[in-house]
Each structure stands twice: as structure tokens, then as C-alpha cells.
Amino acid sequence: MASQVIALVVNDEEREFIAKPGTSLLSGLRDSLGLTAAKRGCAQGGCGACTVLVDGKAVLSCLLAVETINGATVRTLEGVAADGQLDEVQSAFLDGFATQCGFCTPGMIMAAEALLDRNPDPGEDEVAEAISGNHCRCTGYRPIMNAIVDAARRRREARAAAGAPARVSEEVA
Amino acid sequence: MNYRLASIDKDYFADQRDERYSVIGSVVQRSDAFGHVTGRTEFFEDQAPARMLHVKMHRSQRHHARIRGIDVSAAEAVPGVVRALTHADIPNNLYTPLKLIGIGPDDEPILAEGTVRYLGEPVCAVVAETEAAAYDAAARVAVSYEDLPAVFDVEEALAPGAPVVNEYHGHNYFTYEGHHCRRLRFGDVDRALATADHVFEWRYQSSPIEQAPAETTGCIVVPQPDGRLRIHSDTQACFFTLDNTALILNTPPGKLRIVGGTVGGGFGGKVDVAVEPVACVAAMATGRPVKYVYNRYEEMQVSSPRAAERIYIKDAVMNDGRITGRQIRFYADAGAYSRHSPYAITKSAAHMPGPYTIPNVWADCHCVFTNRTPSSAMRGFGVTILDFALESQMDRIARALGADPLQLRLINAYRDGDVKAHRKVAEGTALVEVIQKAAEIVGHELPEDFRRMSSASREGA
């Protein structure tokens, strides 16, 4: 099989690259597009460090052959604070000491973004479920769980203050 | 968010200085956290130098065997393969990481030479244009073996007639100043055991524990125009790695530069000199950047875990709870090579008999070689499993005597001025106060005389 041109909308930009058959989305992001926030922890779908959003859903980019999602919309951690302003999840992770070595952090934040997009007020069980595919070997998870709950509260308050509806993306719920 | 702030309890430590701290008690943001939450922190594998080659390893498929021959022809025929490396390509193939602090002998090859001593030992490295080609070729390296008897149990390894794992030592133990183990001798344990009201002996055994960092061990080596090598590594020990790699490459340390300090989880697992020497040799041989990174299987199977330990503790105990003698036989499974284990076992000996004042102590601490994956550093290695055994022993003694486990500890806790088994005078002890406070917090009632005990004196103990 021949290589093909892959076109994706990545962090609101149209990007194209040439990929051999079977190239993972993770490899496409890191090796072809230079977006290195998503990490290769296990390359077998076990650790969640490569988690990104494809059409709003959290996916393991190391397991996704990029030719199967040609034309999709992808969001990585680089696209979350693109304007230089940390969002609620990032600032809650920062303030809540939810990072140590930082290697799982990009995947954790993207898994949290996907959760808060579909559920602005998750309970602890829902937070635990949302990051159940993301390994952290440093923190013991507690600060991460607290940060995600805190981020949801911050986002609800910010939206209420702005008069915006709490729920913004019904289609992925 | 509420933070519980560290403070000094003036009820107990009245003479400590006043708390006029500028940092303790305040919330200080981690300096690296902004990079972490924005994805901008640079880990070694985020480097993407042009024309980078990839190293993958062919590993021993035997626990213990003589190598009859290594055939790399099929590997070198794989499209994209640049070359294969064996022990003959490594300038100083034999090393041991602690030689930097005078510990020897050199007992481990970078690439196996003549013998393999554990399953997964590196034998032949393949350098290729792509990761896929390197994997394919590494699988096609053909090694012919003559099996040797293997030993996997620490006590079997020390028994007469056991196969010798590592001939650089000549026997299956590391030698401490001429002795077959690290020894601790204090008082007369035999007499204590003979005159005790009770003698309790139990056995403790742990398994190897893999650190399992989120980021696997790896490095990218980039040759510089001035002939130096720039090593991007996730090692926990930049200077240690630099010096050991320089010795292995037979090159002045100034020819190497390590860029590191950003470690995607280590927990001791990235203290060994695992990948840099081979990657440097590959970079020097090809003049091109080289990446050598473990996959998850290698991280779990081959990177060195915490040693499995077997510990026998035999205690002389009086009816009133005093422990008058403690005899410990301690075996750490170093696996096939020393790595950092000789140091760990010294730490174990230094930690005995726990934070208790016991007048008679006898310990033999063995650093044992077996045909298992070499073990090495992991969070408090040499001490953590020993503490599990020592504190389990205290609980079991309390249960056997029908005594309160905290009271048993308070009776035996070391006090300021006590002489420990290593002839060091204990100072700054706080075990008594910590137990008292812990008991109070969890609502565990202690009798008045135990609440009045102090680390400052033996009174009441």
C-alpha cells in the first residue's frame, strides 16, 4: 500500500502530512506535525499518556491508525492554551499540585477536557471513570481527581458569570 | 484548597527555634508545573534531530548459557539496517556502575561476551533508519547457545555446588572487605536467646518490584561538529551516567555532554547506565543522531527492579516486652550483576535492627547473585522491604505476647544517648513522641506511664 496524504484540523489549523499505512495518530502528531505534548508511554494503549481529542472524544492516539480518521478534527494540549491563557483544567492542575514528573499530564488534561465537555458537574466516580485509562505513577491520583473536580467548579462559575449555558457540547454526551 | 502546614510541635520540642520561616508554611508553585500543564516541558524523546537512526536490541533468550556464535547476516540484510554492534564494538565492554566510588570488580558487559547470565541480557544492537527496520533486524540476529545450569533462589545460590552465576566474583555473593556478607555484631545474641522468656522467629519474602515509570528509559545522542556527543537522556543521574559512559567509551568526560533533568518518572529505575553507552557507540560509528529507547516490555522485563529480599528475624523477648536480642539473616537477590546492590545491602545493615534499642544484635546481610534480572535502585532500596519485615515482626511479637503493639514499640524505641548496634550514639530521636502523637490522632488509648515517656530519657521504659 502506498503512503497517503492525511488532512486533519489540528487545534483549529488545517494540517497535511504524508503517512505510511498504519502510522498512528500519535506518530503523525509528534513526528510529522511536531506536536509533542502527547506522549508515548507504552505504545500499546495501556497508559493513556497519548490521549488527545478526535472530534471531541478522548482517544488513545497510539492505537489509532491515522488513515482511518482522515479529515477529522483533533485537539491536543498545545491547542488548549493556544491564546496563552490557561484554561480551568490547566489552572486547577497548576494550583492543585496535580503534576509531578509531568509525563502523564497532557493525557490527563485531555481526558479531563473530554469529561467536562460532556458533563460540567461530574461526581468523583465519574472523574475516576474518565481517567481510568490514564496511568500516573507519581501522584497517587488524589490531587488529579481533586483538580478535575475543582476545574469543573471553576468552569461552571466562569460560565455563570458570563451568562453562558453550562453545557456547550451536547452531541458528544 | 486547604494545605496542612508543617510545623514543629512545641509541646514536645520546646527548645526548637521559633517558627519564623519565609518558605515553610507558604504555598510555592512548582517551577516545572507551567510547562507540564501546557505540554511544553521537553522530555528527551521530544527531540527530533534530522537523519536520526534507531537502535533496537537483540536480547538473550536463555537464563544462563555460553554463546557459541552470533550471526548478524540476516539482520544486516534487512532494508534500512545501517549496522549491527556486538561486544567487540564497545571500547571498554566490562563495567560496574559503582566503580566511580571504588566498588568492584567490573562484572557486567555492555553487550554479552561469551556468556549470558539472565533472560533479556543485551547481546547485539541493531542500528537502522527506522524503528520498524531496527525491530525487524534485531529479531533476525541468530545466536547459538550452549545452556548452562541456572540458579534462581538466593539460598540455593549460596549452597555448596550451586552453579556460579558471575565468574568475575567467582562465587554467588558480593565480597565485603573480605567477608562473604555485610556483618553486624553487637553484644552476645546467643546468650540473649538462651536466657529469654520467649524466642520468636519468622521469615519474610518479597518479590522484585518494577518502578514502571510512565516514560520508558531512553536517550537520543547527537554528534556535534566539534566531535563531542550531546546526550539527551531521561537518566536520574546525569553526572553518574556521564562518567560511567566516558569510562565505557574510553573517552575523556569532556567529550560528552548530557542534557537531562527532565525525567518522566524514575523512582530509582533510571539510575543505572542502561542505554547511553550503546547509543553513543552507534552515534560514533555512524556519525548520525541515534535514539535508543526501551519499549514497555523492556521496561518491565529488563530494566532493573527493586531486589527480591528474604529476611529471617529471630528475637529474644522478655515477658515485659523488652527485646533483648535480635538475629537477622538477610538475603537480597542482586540478579546476575552488581549494579547498585552492594550499596543497598550496606544500607540494609546500617538500618538494623530498626529504630529500637536492642542490646544484642547479630546480622548477616548477603548480596547474592542469581540468574535473574539484575536488581538495582528503587525508592529506599535496601530499607523499605526490611522495614516491612521489622515492623511486621514487632506486630507479631505483640500479638504473641497479647501486648499492645504501640506499647511494645514504646518500650523498645531508641532514645537519645543510646548506642546503636553500629556503635553510633543516637541523637535527635523522636520515635516516642511520634508514636504518642499518632496514638492520640487515631484515638488509640495509651496508659499514663506510656504517655509520659520521652525520647530524652529511658525513664519509665
Image: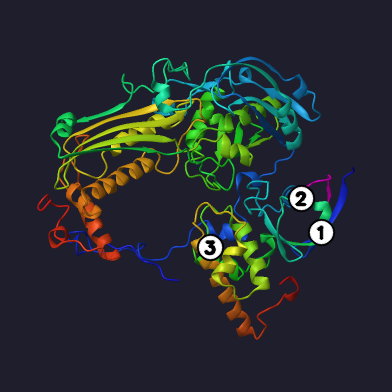
Q: Residue at x 25, y 53 (%)?
A: B405
Q: Residue at x 66, y 60 (%)?
A: A77
Chain under callout 3: A
In the rendered image, residues at marks 1 and 2 fall on the same chain:
yes
Which residues make up the magenta segment? A16-24
Which of pointers 1 and 2 lies earlier in the amino acid sequence?
Answer: 1
Question: Which residue is denoted by mark 3 in the rendering?
Answer: A144
Please tell me the numbered disc located at residue A28. 2
Task: Give the CA distance from mark 2 to mark 3.
Answer: 28 Å
- Would you say B284 lies left or right of B186 here? right
Q: Could you say which is closer to the camera, residue A97 or residue A48? A: A48
Please tell me the numbered disc located at residue B448. none
Give how far across and how far down residue B238 sits, in percent.
50, 38
How busy is the neighbourhood of tag 3: few (under 14 within 10 Å), some, or many (20 plus)? many
Q: Residue at x 47, y 16 (%)?
A: B167
Q: Residue at x 31, y 20 (%)?
A: B179
Residue B91 is one of the magenta-drawn residues:
no
Q: Nearer the viewer, mark 2 or mark 3?
A: 3
Chain under callout 2: A
Give how far across and how far down residue B23 sits, in percent.
37, 62
Amino acid at pointer 3: Ile
Chain under callout 1: A
Query: Is residue B423 among the parts visible in the rendering?
Result: yes
